[in-house]
Image (spheres, rainbow, N blue to C red):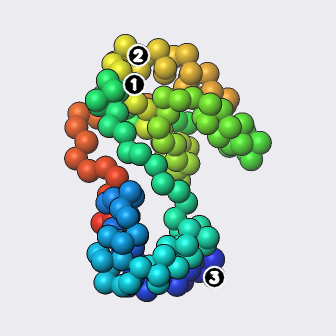
Amino acid sequence: MQDDQPDLDRFDRAILHVLAGDGRISITDLARAIGLSKSPTQARLRRLEKSGVITGYRAQIDPIRLGQDHVSFVEVRLHDTREAALAAFNAAVLRVPEIEQAYMIAGNFDYLLKIRTHSMADYRRVLADRVSTLPHVASTSTYVAMEAVKEDALEDVI
């Protein structure tokens, strides 16, 4: 285990598992769910927050109910992969709201982007006006998702 990773016991992992499924659970119900009393559960929760294992709480929003049901994965190849070029690309990606996720990849391309839009026409506009104009982009390849089989399953690995 790396030095910066906290040592988590079964109660800590149980807290994370329960919170991954219901971040709004009361401390009393959380304590009951993991089999500890309220005070030690609160102390553990504070420790997990302070150590950075728990980074925050937020509402999970269904993008499909908001009309954002078109998902594309885009391989991006850059013509320059020096540190300054990567930093410029990374900073620009953060300013494109349609890019839901972005990963630097070790492989035949440099980045994999998950882009969520209303429609194929909307996606084509985002690709042409935003993604293709990001710094140092040499080429892109698009894969359109037909169905999400599994998403947001962090609780499965805790």
User: Which residue in the structure is indicated by mark 3?
Assistant: 3
Name the residue type under label 2. Asp
Name the residue type under label 3. Asp
Q: Secondary structure at mark 1?
A: strand
Q: With 145 as the anchor, is 128 left or right in this view? A: right
Specify few, some or many for label 2: CA neighbours under 10 Å numbering under 14, 14-19, or 20 or more.
few
Q: With 91 as the anchor, is 142 left or right in this view? A: left
Residue 92, how many percent across, how many down? 65, 32
Disc 1 to disc 2: CB gap under 8 Å: yes
Compared to residue 155, the image places residue 63 above or below, namely above
Quadrant position of residue 29: bottom left
Disc 3 to disc 2: CB gap under 8 Å: no
User: Which residue in the structure is indicated by mark 1?
Assistant: 117
Label 1, label 3: how far apart the Cα atoms are: 40 Å
Closer to the N terminus: mark 3 or mark 2? 3
- Residue 122's tag is 2
Q: Secondary structure at mark 2?
A: helix
Label 3, label 2: how far apart the Cα atoms are: 45 Å
